[in-house]
Image (cartoon, rainbow, N blue to C red):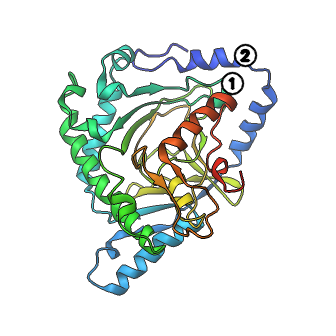
Amino acid sequence: MIESNHNPPLLHDYTQLLQRSRDSVETKQRINYEQEMEECGLPLVDLGGLWSMNEEESVSCASEICKASAEWGFFQIVNHGISLELLRRMRKVQVELFKAPFEQKMASGLLDNSYRWGNRTATCPKQLSWCEAFHVPLSKISDETCYGEFSSLREVMQEYADAMQELAKSIARVLVMNMGGGRSLWEDNCNESTCFMRLNRYPSCPISPEVFGLVPHTDSDFLTILHQDEHVGGLQLMKDSKWVAVKPNPDALVVNIGDLFQAWSNDVYKSVEHKVTVNQEAERHSIAYFLCPSYESFIGCCDKESSIYRRFTFGEYRRQIQEDVKDYGHKVGLPRFLVST
């Protein structure tokens, strides 16, 4: 296969990793496993009720959000206040951005040098992510110098980021108040200087399903809002100890709980392992917004007397993840911060 000039050299990486790896049985087992995948419908929450003047409707909507966060760690939202027109404009500029030549995306300093692809720390094929992405700090989205010849991106990205920021805070407010917490948890610590937006592209993959689009992981934030591909599926999550596929819903956004909310809620809300698979024929796009605190912020617990996690800063958590990936090839996450460890 000859990779087009806008694709990163993922096939080359895979070939190199495969030559180093001796575990061919694992690949065969994974192929058989993918063929048996079940498809699920995530809990669907109509956010129109959250802003209703009817108190009963508002309370009911908040209850649905909290229940889904505790039982699934994932849910879909409709009537979320972000226009379909804005979502379509953002998707259009995202697709155009990824059509740029690979060398240009690598070398141009585009979007604060946030371009990344594959997995630089992978030591075997199962650790390779068949994707490319821009992982952009929200603080840089308004910076004109970050766009170069892609200046048309700036206006729609700023509008999109602002809308996601407000939506994420509305959902976080519900989750915090349900546990008896105050607004300071996210309003003082989560803003455009600490949050991120990630533009993903998963190229078609001739060796699917031998590699992941994105390796299994949990998110290291408070919560994530995902605008996934309207037509091409690929998102899968762990439910009741088995992988299930999430059917694309063009009318909905996907919300998932991150590690920090699980720690703060004392395991009431669940940060669930998830992954992305790739398609042999079609490429896939998605956009994720991550609600993160500053690196200096302490992640405590809503129940200070019986917390199962020790107090830690977000920066400490991120550093531990980086060390674990370097040492073991994968993230260990919250178990590192249990009180007993």
List the residue tagged with mark 2.
20
Please rate how many residues cluster around mark 2, counting C-alpha atoms within 10 Å: few if below 14, some from 14 to 19, many from 20: few
Q: Residue at x 65, y 42 (%)?
A: 332
Task: Give the secondary structure at mark 2.
Answer: helix
Name the one closer to the observer, 3 or 79: 79
Tell me which numbered mark, 2 or 1, is placed earlier along the sequence.
Answer: 2
Q: Amino acid at mark 1?
A: Cys
> Which of the labelled discs sits on residue 235, or is there none?
none
Please rate how many residues cluster around mark 1, counting C-alpha atoms within 10 Å: few if below 14, some from 14 to 19, many from 20: some
Q: Position of residue 31 (x, y in %)?
A: 72, 36
Determine whether 222 is above or below 144 in the image.
below
Q: Quadrant of residue 272?
A: bottom right
Residue contact at pointers 2 and 1, CB within 8 angstroms:
yes
State the quadrant of the N terminus: top right
Q: Position of residue 29 (x, y in %)?
A: 78, 37
Q: Position of residue 205 (x, y in %)?
A: 55, 28
Name the one closer to the observer, 158 or 299: 299
Determine whether 100 is above or below 233 in the image.
above
Name the one closer to the observer, 35 or 331: 331
List the residue tagged with mark 1.
124
